[in-house]
Image (cartoon, rainbow, N blue to C red):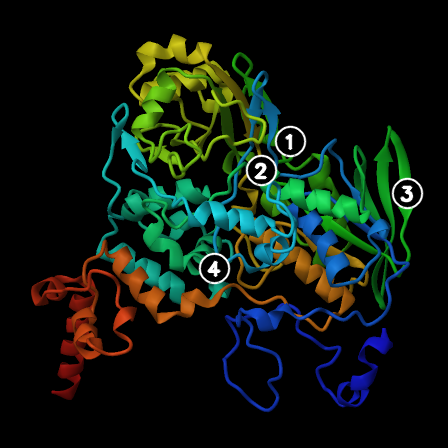
Amino acid sequence: MDSITSKFDKALKASNVYGHVDHQPDSSKETPKNTPEKSYPFSDQIGNYQRNKGIPTKSYKDSKVYIVGSGIAGLSAAYYFIRDGHFTPENITFIEQLHIDGGSLDGAGNAKDGYIIRGGREMDCTYENLWDIFQDIPALEMPAPYSVLDEYRLVNDNDSNYSIARLIHQQGKVKDFSKFGLNKKDQLAIIKLLLKKKEELDDVTIEEYFSNTFIESNFWTFWRTMFAFENWHSLLEFKLYMHRFLHAIDGLNDLSSLIFPKYNQYDTFVTPLGRWLKEKGVKIQLNTLVKDLDMLINADGKVVKGIITEQDGKEVVIPVSENDFVIVTTGSMTEDTSYGNNTIVPVLAVDNSTSGQSTGWKLWKNLAAKSPVFGKPEKFCSNIEKSSWESVTLTCKPSALIEKLKEYSVNDPYSGKTVTGGIITITDSNWLMSFTCNRQPHFPTQPDDVLVLWVYALFMDKEGNYIKKTMPACTGNEILTELCYHLGIVDQIDDVIDNTIVRTAYMPYITSMFMPRAKGDRPNIVPEGCKNLGLIGQFVETNNDVVFTMESSVRTSRVAIYELLNLNKQVPDINPLQYDIRHLLKATKTLNDDKPFLGEGLLKKILKGSYFEHILPIGSDTHHEEEKESFLAEQFGKFRDWVGGIRG
């Protein structure tokens, strides 16, 4: 590939950085100072300058790529091999255990048998890597030259998302969800957590750090149900989420910070990206189980020599050369899903004795047995009781359930516009059940008289309030009955059951990536010494990004390709809004339920009439007495008295 840069040889040969790029720069450790040695943009300097085309150091025309797993991470890896690595698409092959691509990002079914969506991912405008791909992938329904991003914005720019019933209780009554309800001590605990170094939080859980008043607050109800956190999950991951979504915190209660696609996420993202890859010539080999990798490990490094698969009951080894590449999605949040329907339960009881024994986890365990650099999968797959929950997809004809749904809807459910605006949580549900109705139709072929609702709950060990069973032990009709009880329409359950197809999915590892962890538990994207192997997905280490998002899946794939190919291109760190004074001020006031924070009155006086007046949060008309009574003002007063005592 020297011909591409031949006119720049003198400058490149004299460069200290060419060929030595930090492909995953870390904004949490970088001091943004311009120096003569600083030639690359700052780590979180988002913008068009970061959209240069990568230049491979050699030709990969004959190199083969094998991608284990065809979820959004794997699909993204293929995209970046083609766009930035200039690989021949026909030399890229997906190896997938399932009979369909898409991985955990699925959505399927029909109106006759019922639709099913195991889960969904929260979406945000700051997903720089996701939108980097989908700005160029042809749209699902709009004509050329429009992209998936164009469709996404067309919908969301013209149909705002928000909720009018984020919390309900007492058999269907809307509960006040305007406040977070954090006391001063818990607000300070959040601030202290934001200031803590990540290295201090190895294996610490949320409930070990926060008080019971925090756990009982509206804030935690909003947070845990929106992102699927449990009390026993990783405090480190909660901290990363706080930094990642600090700019969206004032939309946490009414969900106005969210943006949803027109359809389910499989049809919105997997279908168009998969179609683009197939049209390019990328191959997919379904119904093929990858059991292990044959690796040569010595002082020179770690090289994959073969992929050990099982095909039609026979072991088949796919040879891999040093010039080929293997990309593996480690672990799986939807592995071992159990399914049920109106009359069949998904599982009778949660069984932890079989945890981590399924094929998706076995591959990671086999890798981990070869070297410590491949992490500790058992940290994530050994406690089903703490990593599982169940989701339910309802395919609904008109019934009492739909009439009740209309009371909680922003727009008519059949209008094609925002319906509930996200999940509605039943706060007095023993299961902590939530349900949602996104824009309809949720599937492109869905009939006009059918609505698709999605339900999930976090507590798998509690009996229902009405149905005295745990959720996994319930049939679909029993779960529907429990939902109708909480909506105050259990007396009309026969009508609801007659007009509703229920499909359930119990997922043992759905929040396994949230389990408490320490440094080294997750492998690096390109583990130390690996020459032709990259690991991607939700169980690999990134600097500052979070898990359980499509953005993090895409980020890991992009980093893997850039590092393996040593491209002269970086993957920018997460969007730097956490450092923006405007969002910091807004978050401070939001956490205090829009009451004044320390210094707000002074800031208002200083900035009034100036260029910077707009940085103050909306509603900054403060009164001296309100500010005096604020918690932070109390702390400042104590500090002032302490300083006065020293001077005295």
Image point 56% across, 35% down: which residue? 384
Asked if residue 230 shows in the view, the reply is: yes
Earlier sequence position, callout 4 versus callout 1: 4
Badge 4 element: helix
In the image, which is nearer the foreground, mark 4 or mark 2? 2
What is the C-alpha distance between the residues marked 4 and 3? 42 Å
Give the residue type at disc 3.
Val
Marker disc for residue 449: none
| Amino acid type of the residue that numbered disc 4 sits on in the rendered structure | Leu
- SS class, disc 1: loop
Relative to 218, 273 lies left or right: right
User: Distance between the Cα atoms at labels 4 and 1?
Assistant: 30 Å
Q: Residue at x 61, y 24 (%)?
A: 109
* Neighbours of disc 4 within 10 Å: few (<14), some (14-19), many (20+): many
Residue nearest the observer in this picture, 597 or 570: 570
**Distance between mark 2 and mark 3 Cα atoms:** 29 Å
Q: Residues within 10 Å of mark 2 (few under 14, many from 20)?
A: many
The residue at which mark 4 appears reads as 201
Residue 465 shows in the view: no
Question: Which residue is more in the foreground, 357 or 423?
Answer: 423
Question: Mark 1 highlights which residue?
Answer: 336
